[in-house]
Amino acid sequence: MNSYLESIKKQFLYYKMLGEKAMEQLTEEQLFWQYNEESNSIAILTNHIAGNMLSRFTDFLTTDGEKDWRNRDSEFTNSFLNKTEMMNYWNKGWECLLTTLEQLSEKDLEKIIYIRNDGHTVVEAINRQLAHYPYHIGQMVFIAKMLKNEAWNTLSIARNKSGNYNNRKFSQEKSKRHYTDDL
């Protein structure tokens, strides 16, 4: 199961990188842009993701993942004055998550933890968040891609470049590696 812990760390870091590469392509003003009042800006999504991380992964093994100090509703409003504040909070959330993952051992994986009084094994709780954060990071990438339009720098295999990518991958020897190792 140590391979599980190593794999999920790489997965989380991959999605962190995608979010950051999307944000790097935008102006500060674009990070706060909303399509309409009901939609989220990248800044709002950042606020929610980091707020969720802080709640879920603070005292991960010993307290409910929905902390009494968390105000989830306020995460869906813009509380940042600028990009620097936004990125500081983003990094605070990721630091909490990644520090917690580093402290886990194989023997912790079957322990029961709670989120809103619903019991989860540690694996289930991590998998829950590994589905949740990429859902929102995908929204961030989509917003950024719409705003950049033709100036967008792809974060994946570029259109009409799958053949080149596959040729490079198949020219390598078969080996056990994580797909994010050569990004």
Image (cartoon, helix red, strand yellow):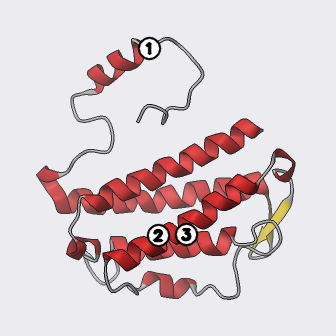
| 10 Å crowding of disc 2: few (<14), some (14-19), many (20+) | many
Going from N to C along the chain, the mark reached first, 2 or 1, is: 2
Q: Which residue is mark 2?
A: 90
**In front of the other: 11 or 150:** 11
Q: Which residue is mark 3?
A: 93
On the image, the x and y values in percent for residue 78 come to 38, 85
Disc 3 vs disc 1: Cβ atoms closer than 8 Å? no
On the image, the x and y values in percent for residue 73 come to 52, 86
Residue in view at x 23 percent, y 64 percent: 26
Which circle marks residue 139 in the picture?
A: none
Please state which amino acid type lies under the numbered disc 2.
Answer: Trp
Disc 3 vs disc 2: Cβ atoms closer than 8 Å? yes
Q: Is residue 114 left or right of residue 29?
A: right
Quadrant of the rendered image containing residue 99: bottom right
Element carrying mark 2: helix
Disc 2 vs disc 1: Cβ atoms closer than 8 Å? no
Which circle marks residue 172 in the picture?
A: 1
User: Disc 3 and disc 1: Cα gap in Å?
Assistant: 36 Å
**In front of the other: 103 or 67:** 103
Element carrying mark 1: loop
| 10 Å crowding of disc 1: few (<14), some (14-19), many (20+) | few
**In front of the other: 37 or 126:** 126
Q: Is residue 117 above or below residue 136?
A: below
On the image, the x and y values in percent for residue 179 come to 50, 32
Q: Is residue 80 above or below residue 171?
A: below
Quadrant of the rendered image containing residue 149: bottom left
Please state which amino acid type lies under the numbered disc 1.
Answer: Gln
Residue in view at x 24 percent, y 56 percent: 145
User: Disc 3 and disc 2: Cα gap in Å?
Assistant: 5 Å
User: Disc 2 and disc 1: Cα gap in Å?
Assistant: 36 Å
Residue in view at x 62 percent, y 62 percent: 97
On the image, the x and y values in percent for residue 88 come to 44, 73
